[in-house]
């Protein structure tokens, strides 16, 4: 417009079109065309003071019979073009070909693309990322929390708000979890996949510690448990760049939208449980996903069901069961520790590094990718869980002896002997300290009659002779007092043989 004003001034001074073109650095034909437009519009120098650049441009270049803002050629429905472009394999070239097939006199390809980019800029003032259907789901936690009251104490506890947005359709999922810790983080993903009814190609999380151990632009380190969940569903994990929120602009916008549509609308409600809060969030999600987007003219749910969902991969046959993975080193007692409890592994792995996989019910231990042990997870009771097959042979033979086993053997001899064994075990600070004495008594009683063993046991309990030496002495005295007892008559009781496999003192190594 500045050059046009200069042109009119020079023309008034009688300068030729050729000289004006040289002065302004434009083609003579352009000067001649613009002078004709000025004459036709009744414009000459000096121009009125209220003649702005916009008014001057409209006077010179406006087309008669064309309403301002209207185009001379038919245009496609740009909202429909934007929707179609999200489908796999669809490009602007394909959409332009279809447009020209319907409107042969329509815009050329370059003008078609220019008009579409102009429509996109009206959708968002920032750069728009191309999101193909079924390609990505963006996940994050809202910075703001939802309050839940304890119905008994009235204590307020704040829950986190997990939000996921699918790339092409902006279909949104949200739920409240107590924490951002690994079990809640992975559990929210499992429920999200159920909500979507399928699996996208990639998950784009923030660099949350539950998902990413070490943030890096080039080689981010994914948490192993999170990676196992992704492998179960066949989905890749592509963390956003550190401190680059626009890498996941979808979920950032979804977070802001959710904060207003969920937290804002529910701010006056009081929740007394996590389930109650999630039920209210589900209702708010329906409003979000059923809301018709102003520019596109369709809802998120419609886009998801028609464009996105058919492109998702199928869910696996079973849900992922949360499992936490840790490294551990086997101790000299061939046990590994997890959350204060100890679980055995084969004794040949002493001092070796192993992988521990812990679920709510089981503890699995792997060495070089091979499972070497599995235990039921312990939350109380004895701290050690030991599989006899993991023990060295000498330890295993010793471990076979228990107080219950000694009591069962003594009961097979008689009540007096059972009382003696109970007294021996009770007289020690730890029952295990009486095992050797019980083994000695077993050896002494192996070749005598039950009646004689019962008499010796009763006498030992009466005088408090609860050690091997005292019982052996009483047995020797009973034999002296009854010299007629024949050795042949003292046969080995079948009950004793059935209950124990005695090896005598050689049992201990």
Image (tube, rainbow, N blue to C red):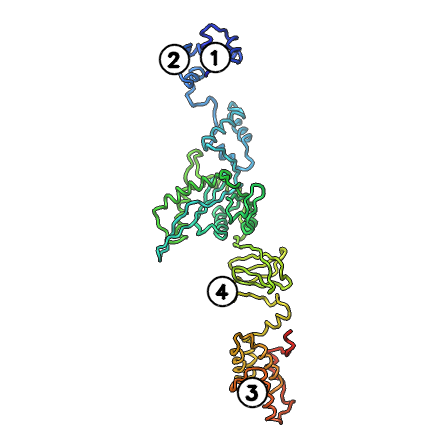
Q: Are marks 1 and 2 in contact (CB under 8 Å)?
A: no
Depth check, mark 1 against mark 2: the one in front is 2
Q: State which mark lies toward you, 3 or 1.
A: 3
Checking the image for residue 34, the label placed there is 1
Q: Secondary structure at mark 3?
A: helix
Name the N-terminal-most of marks 1 and 2: 1
- For the view shown, which residue lies furthest in the top direction? 14
Whether pointer 2 and pointer 4 mark residues with C-beta atoms closer than 8 Å, the reply is: no
Q: Residues within 10 Å of mark 4 (few under 14, many from 20)?
A: few
Q: Residue at x 47, y 30 (%)?
A: 121
C-alpha distance separating marks 2 and 4:
93 Å
* Nearer to the camera, 403 or 474: 474
* Residue 87 is at least partly visible in this image: yes
State the separation of the CA atoms marked 3 and 1: 134 Å
**Counting residues from the N terminus, which is met first, the one under dot 2 or under dot 3?**
2
Q: Which mark is residue 456?
A: 3
């Amino acid at each position: 417009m500045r050059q046009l004003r200069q042109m009119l001034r020079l023309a008034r001074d009688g300068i030729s079109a050729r000289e004006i073109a040289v002065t302004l650095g434009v083609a003579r034909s352009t000067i001649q065309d613009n002078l004709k437009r000025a004459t036709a519009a009744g414009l000459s120098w000096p121009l009125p003071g209220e003649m702005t650049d916009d008014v001057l441009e409209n006077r010179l270049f406006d087309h008669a019979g064309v309403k301002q803002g209207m185009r001379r050629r038919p245009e496609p429905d740009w909202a429909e073009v934007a929707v179609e472009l999200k489908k796999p394999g669809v490009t602007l070239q394909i959409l332009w070909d279809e447009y020209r097939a319907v409107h042969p006199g329509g815009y050329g390809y370059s003008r078609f693309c220019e008009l579409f980019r102009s429509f996109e800029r009206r959708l968002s003032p920032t750069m728009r990322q191309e999101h193909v259907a079924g390609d990505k789901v963006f996940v994050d936690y809202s910075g703001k929390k939802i309050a839940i009251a304890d119905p008994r104490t009235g204590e307020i506890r704040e829950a986190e708000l997990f939000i996921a947005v699918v790339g092409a359709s902006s279909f949104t999922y949200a739920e409240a979890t107590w924490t951002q810790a690994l079990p809640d983080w992975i559990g929210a993903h499992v429920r999200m996949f159920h909500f979507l009814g399928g699996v996208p190609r990639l998950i784009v999380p923030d660099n949350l510690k539950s998902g990413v151990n070490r943030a890096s632009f080039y080689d981010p380190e994914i948490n192993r448990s999170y990676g196992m969940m992704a492998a179960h569903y066949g989905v890749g994990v592509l963390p956003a760049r550190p401190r680059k929120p626009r890498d996941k602009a979808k979920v950032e916008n979804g977070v802001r939208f959710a904060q207003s549509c969920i937290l804002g609308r529910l701010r006056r409600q009081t929740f007394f449980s996590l389930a109650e809060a999630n039920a209210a969030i589900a209702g708010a999600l329906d409003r979000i996903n059923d809301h018709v987007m102003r520019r596109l003219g369709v809802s998120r749910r419609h886009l998801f069901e028609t464009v996105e969902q058919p492109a998702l991969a199928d869910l696996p046959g079973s849900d992922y069961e949360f499992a936490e993975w840790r490294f551990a080193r086997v101790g000299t007692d061939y046990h590994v520790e997890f959350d204060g409890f100890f679980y055995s592994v084969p004794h040949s792995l002493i001092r070796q590094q192993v992988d521990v996989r812990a679920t709510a019910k089981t503890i699995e231990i792997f060495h070089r990718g091979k499972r070497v042990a599995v235990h039921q997870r312990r939350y109380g009771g004895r701290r050690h869980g030991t599989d006899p097959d993991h023990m060295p042979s000498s330890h295993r033979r010793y471990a076979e002896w228990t107080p219950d086993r000694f009591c069962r053997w003594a009961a097979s001899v008689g009540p007096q002997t059972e009382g003696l064994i109970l007294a021996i075990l009770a007289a020690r600070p730890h029952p295990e300290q009486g095992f050797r004495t019980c083994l000695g008594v077993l050896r002494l009683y192996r070749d005598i009659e039950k009646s004689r063993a019962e008499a010796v046991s009763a006498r030992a309990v009466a005088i408090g002779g609860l050690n091997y030496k005292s019982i052996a002495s009483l047995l020797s005295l009973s034999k002296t007092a009854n010299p007629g007892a024949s050795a042949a008559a003292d046969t080995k009781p079948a009950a004793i043989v059935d209950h124990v496999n005695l090896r005598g003192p050689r049992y201990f190594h």
